[in-house]
Every structure is written in structure tokens, then in C-alpha cells.
């Protein structure tokens, strides 16, 4: 029981963050529906038709909608649909901590020395996560019911419970995949990269299927596709039994493989080890010239992940563009939608892309910055920072080089994505204002700078808390940006969101005061990072 309590304690921060995000969104979205959809069945039917067309542009982030003219359909799509991405990210972070992070901190060796078997150790970690997953899922779906009850438009509790069962199955399956991936690498950073890459591929398979592509041969391999087959809130409280059982069966099978791999491998080593090669000792430095250039040395070490980020974001941009023309033309051909789009200022391809794609691009850039900051924290905990400081290199230089590498990497990613967007638009005969696209792309670096500065400050202050702090900033910013216009919150409150400060420079005129605020946040946080790094003992 002592080990189980410790396992619950180790996983509590991720569970709290996930539950908080799910709970806030699940309560806020029913309130938003009551405000937007109207009161009569006719008004809600029109609202549902409008939103179903608009929802087609969000299939990369949300599932296909069902019955958006009803409270149950809105909750299923908007309140709980976004949790697929959230729980996937949580599962990767939690599994990498259990599969590799505990070893890096010496916890596994400690418990093995106390007579705890490997199987029991990893088993209790899995049981603890399963308990936290059930608690977080229950809070999220329960909050959706509470939000609907607040506006006197309740949804069946049984249907919500079934949706929660499917959500637990998705969380456990994602965790199992990431835990197995952690057994194939040697560090937590590597576990996050590999597990995240595998789940991203599985998620993209589902996204492609949502948009009608022929992937029937492999779509059932994606846990996200299996989860999307469940619509108890809009299908009369019926759960897709085969898909749900498939989720839990896959989670159990992959978990068993991960446990076996953990038991069989050596501590600190991957499951599959390459045959060592004899090499002649040498005192000559490495021949890679990039390792001798400040900043570029960091990027060279991240070249594989940087290429992956660049390719994935560019591919997402092309994917978004593939249905933009059809969607915009269809909406403009409908008189009611044409009026709506003209009032919203998105009646052109450039404005529509500015509203939809660049909102997603800013989220991706902030996620990239968070991942980089998590790597900086890992450098401190795994002893690499000591090696850097012993070269000798000043601590201030370490901070500056990290931020510079972050900005250059982010610049490469967003530049490639926008170049792909412009090339794809030209080939699809879509007229885009290249100048606005370039400006909007360049200003996304201010978001990266703000998150990077906050991350550097967090690493210099409390490395282990950095990920939670940045996740909180992103979560709060996302909800503030979304809910402030809806509930007419004051402007100062809306400006608490980093995303609201970025605005929409592709669609509207640039608010230089807000962009300057982003720059000031990044600069102030970077200055705080310099001070914190100078004063804190490495590893403390």
C-alpha cells in the first residue's frame, strides 16, 4: 500500500491538470450552447446546421459532429471531443515517467533494493494510473452533466457514464502504447519522443478517416478511431460494444507486453540493445563542425525531432488546405452562411485560413516550446546540465543558447508550414495574400518566445514544476481566448491569454500593443531565467 500511495502521488499533478482542463471545458461548453443556440427547436436546428458545416474545418482537432442542435450532441462534440488530444498527451507524459523517469531519479533501484519485484513495481504504477484515469474521466463527464443541468437542459446520466467508460478505455490504451515505447529507449526524453510519435501517427490515421480517405485497412489499429465509434449521448445511450471492448483488450495486451519488457530488460538499458562495435580510441574531437558553433550544436542534437516536427506541421497545413476551398465555396453558396461569414469577416480564403489554420499553428508552436522546456528540465535532472557548465560555459550563455535554439527551431517549423501552405494554395488555385501569411507566420515566434521565456524561468526556479506551469498557462490561455468574447469578459481579462495577445494578424489589422506585450512577457521571463539560473544550485 505504501508503494501504491507513492505511485498515486507521483501521478497526481498530471491527473489534476487533465481533470481541471476537462472539468472547466465540460462546464463552460453547455453554458456556451445555451447562449448561442437559442431557445426554440427551430433556432437550435438552424444553429446545428451552421455548426455542422463549420465543424468540418476542425476535424484535425475534434471528432465529426452528431446532432449539434441538441445539448447532448454539443457536449459530445465540443465539451468532450477535445479530451482525445488532452488525454493522449497526459498518457505520454505519465507513461514516460513510469517507464523511464523513475529510473532516472533512482526510484526503481531504491524499491528493488527493498525487495520489491519489478513486476509488482510496474504493476502498481499501472494500477495507480488507471485509478487516476477513472477519476479524471469521471470528473470530466460529470462536469458536463452539471453544466447542462445549470441551464436546465440536462442530458441522461447513463449516456454520460457510458461515454466516460469509452474515455477510460482510450486513456488506458494510449498509456499502454507509450509505456511500451518507453521500454525501447534509454531516457525519458526519448520515451516522450517515441511514444508521442506513435500516438500522433495513430491519431492522424483517425483524422484522415474523418475526412473520408480510404484507410479502412488500418483505421481499426487507432485507439482514437475506436473511441470515435462511440456516441452514447446521441445514439440513444447505446455504446459501440465491439469498439469499446477493442480499446480495453488492446490496452490489456499492450500493457502485458510493456510489463514483460520492463521485467526482462536491464535498468537504464533499452529492451533491444545494439551489438557493441569495437572502435579505436582517439583523442581527436568529433568531425561534425556544427558541434563547435553555439546554438547550432543544440539544433544538431535535435535534428531528428526538428525534422519530424517540421514535416508533421507542414503536412497538417497541406491537409487543412485540402478541404478549405470546398468548404469555403460551399458555405458562400449558401445565403445564410454567406451572411454569417461576411459578418464574421471570413468570406475570403485568406481570412478563413487566418482564423482556422493560424489558430492551430499557434497552439502547435506553444506545444513545441513546452516540449523544449521539458527537455531543459530533463537536462538538469539527468546530469547533462552539469556537463555543459563544466566545459566551462557561463550559465547565462546556457539560457541564451537554449532560447535562441528554440526560436530558430520554431522559425524553421512555421516557415516550412507556411511555405507548404502557399505552394499548396497556388496548386489548388486558391488566392492567398502572401504578405499577410508571412506576417502572421513571423508573429507566431512571439508566442514561442513567451512560452520559451516562461519555460526557462521555470527551469531555473523549479525544474520539476516547469511542465505543469507551462501547461497551466496554455490551458488558461486557451479557455480565456475562447470564452472571453462569448461571455463578454473585460478586455484586461482577455489579455491574460497568450493566444488572445497574438490575435489574428492574418485576418485583421495587427494590434502592435498586444504583440509588444508578448515580446515583453518573453523578455521579462528570460531575464528572470538568467537570474534564477545564476542563483540555483544545479540539480537542486
Image: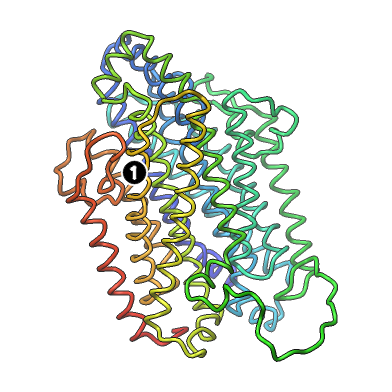
223 vs 519, nearest the viewer: 519
Q: Circle 1: is it few (<14), some (14-19), or many (20+) Cα within 10 Å? A: many
- For disc 1, the marked residue is 440
Instruction: Decide if residue 258 is on the left or right side of residue 231.
Output: right
Q: Is residue 418 above or below residue 228?
A: below
Which residue is located at x 52 percent, y 78 percent? 381
Res. 7 image quadrant:
bottom right
Q: Is residue 402 above or below residue 513?
A: below
SS category of the residue bearing label 1: helix
514 vs 68, nearest the viewer: 514
Residue 442 spot, x, y in % from top left? 35, 50
377 vs 360, nearest the viewer: 360
29 vs 155, nearest the viewer: 29
Question: From where the camera sits, is residue 158 visible?
Answer: no
Res. 360 image quadrant:
top left
Instruction: Decide if residue 241 is on the left or right side of residue 337.
Output: right
Instruction: Decide if residue 133 is on the left or right side of residue 353.
Output: right
Residue 474 spot, x, y in % from top left? 36, 52
Amino acid at each position: 500500500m505504501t508503494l501504491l500511495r507513492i505511485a498515486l502521488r507521483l501521478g497526481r499533478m498530471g491527473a489534476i491538470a487533465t481533470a481541471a482542463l476537462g472539468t472547466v471545458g465540460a462546464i463552460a461548453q453547455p453554458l456556451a450552447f445555451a447562449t448561442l443556440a437559442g431557445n426554440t427547436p427551430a433556432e437550435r436546428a438552424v444553429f446545428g446546421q451552421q455548426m455542422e458545416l463549420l465543424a468540418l474545418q476542425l476535424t484535425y482537432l475534434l471528432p465529426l459532429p452528431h446532432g449539434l442542435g441538441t445539448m447532448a450532441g454539443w457536449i459530445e462534440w465540443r465539451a468532450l471531443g477535445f479530451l482525445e488530444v488532452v488525454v493522449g498527451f497526459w498518457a505520454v507524459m505519465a507513461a514516460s515517467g513510469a517507464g523511464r523517469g523513475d529510473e532516472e531519479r533512482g526510484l526503481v533501484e531504491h524499491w528493488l533494493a527493498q525487495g520489491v519485484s519489478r513486476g509488482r513495481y510496474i504493476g502498481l504504477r499501472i494500477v495507480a494510473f488507471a485509478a487516476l484515469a477513472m477519476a479524471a474521466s469521471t470528473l470530466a463527464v460529470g462536469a458536463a452533466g452539471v453544466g447542462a443541468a445549470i441551464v436546465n437542459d440536462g442530458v441522461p446520466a447513463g449516456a454520460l457514464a457510458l461515454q466516460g467508460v469509452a474515455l477510460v478505455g482510450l486513456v488506458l490504451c494510449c498509456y499502454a502504447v507509450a509505456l511500451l515505447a518507453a521500454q525501447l529507449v534509454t531516457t525519458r526524453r526519448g520515451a516522450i519522443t517515441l511514444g508521442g510519435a506513435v500516438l500522433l501517427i495513430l491519431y492522424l490515421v483517425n483524422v484522415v478517416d474523418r475526412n473520408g480517405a480510404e484507410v479502412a485497412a488500418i483505421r481499426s489499429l487507432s485507439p482514437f478511431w475506436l473511441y470515435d465509434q462511440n456516441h452514447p449521448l446521441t445514439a440513444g445511450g447505446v455504446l459501440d460494444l465491439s469498439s469499446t471492448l477493442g480499446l480495453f483488450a488492446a490496452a490489456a495486451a499492450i500493457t502485458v507486453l510493456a510489463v514483460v519488457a520492463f521485467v526482462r530488460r536491464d535498468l537504464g538499458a533499452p529492451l533491444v540493445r545494439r551489438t557493441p562495435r569495437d572502435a579505436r580510441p582517439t583523442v581527436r574531437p568529433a568531425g561534425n563542425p556544427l558541434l563547435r558553433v553555439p546554438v547550432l550544436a543544440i539544433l544538431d542534437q535535435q535534428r531528428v525531432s526538428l525534422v519530424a516536427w517540421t514535416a508533421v506541421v507542414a503536412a497538417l497545413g497541406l491537409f487543412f488546405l485540402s478541404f478549405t476551398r470546398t468548404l469555403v465555396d460551399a458555405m458562400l453558396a449558401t445565403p445564410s452562411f454567406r451572411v454569417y461569414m461576411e459578418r464574421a469577416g471570413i468570406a475570403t480564403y485568406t481570412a478563413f485560413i487566418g482564423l482556422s489554420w493560424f489558430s492551430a499553428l499557434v497552439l502547435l508552436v506553444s506545444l513545441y516550446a513546452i516540449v523544449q522546456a521539458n527537455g531543459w528540465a530533463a537536462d538538469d535532472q539527468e546530469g547533462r546540465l552539469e556537463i555543459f557548465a563544466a566545459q566551462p560555459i557561463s550559465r547565462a550563455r546556457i539560457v541564451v543558447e537554449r532560447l535562441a535554439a528554440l526560436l530558430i527551431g520554431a522559425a524553421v517549423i512555421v516557415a516550412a508550414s507556411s511555405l507548404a501552405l502557399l505552394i499548396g494554395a497556388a496548386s489548388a488555385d486558391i488566392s492567398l495574400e502572401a504578405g499577410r501569411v508571412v506576417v502572421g507566420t513571423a508573429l507566431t515566434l512571439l508566442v514561442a518566445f513567451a512560452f520559451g521565456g516562461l519555460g526557462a524561468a521555470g527551469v531555473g526556479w523549479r525544474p520539476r514544476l516547469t511542465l505543469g506551469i507551462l501547461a497551466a498557462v496554455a490551458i488558461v490561455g486557451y479557455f480565456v481566448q475562447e470564452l472571453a468574447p462569448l461571455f463578454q469578459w473585460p478586455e484586461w481579462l482577455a489579455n491574460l491569454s497568450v493566444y488572445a495577445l497574438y490575435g489574428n494578424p492574418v485576418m485583421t489589422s495587427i494590434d502592435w500593443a498586444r504583440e509588444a506585450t508578448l515580446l515583453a512577457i518573453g523578455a521579462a521571463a528570460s531575464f528572470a531565467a538568467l537570474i534564477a539560473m545564476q542563483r540555483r544550485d544545479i540539480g537542486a
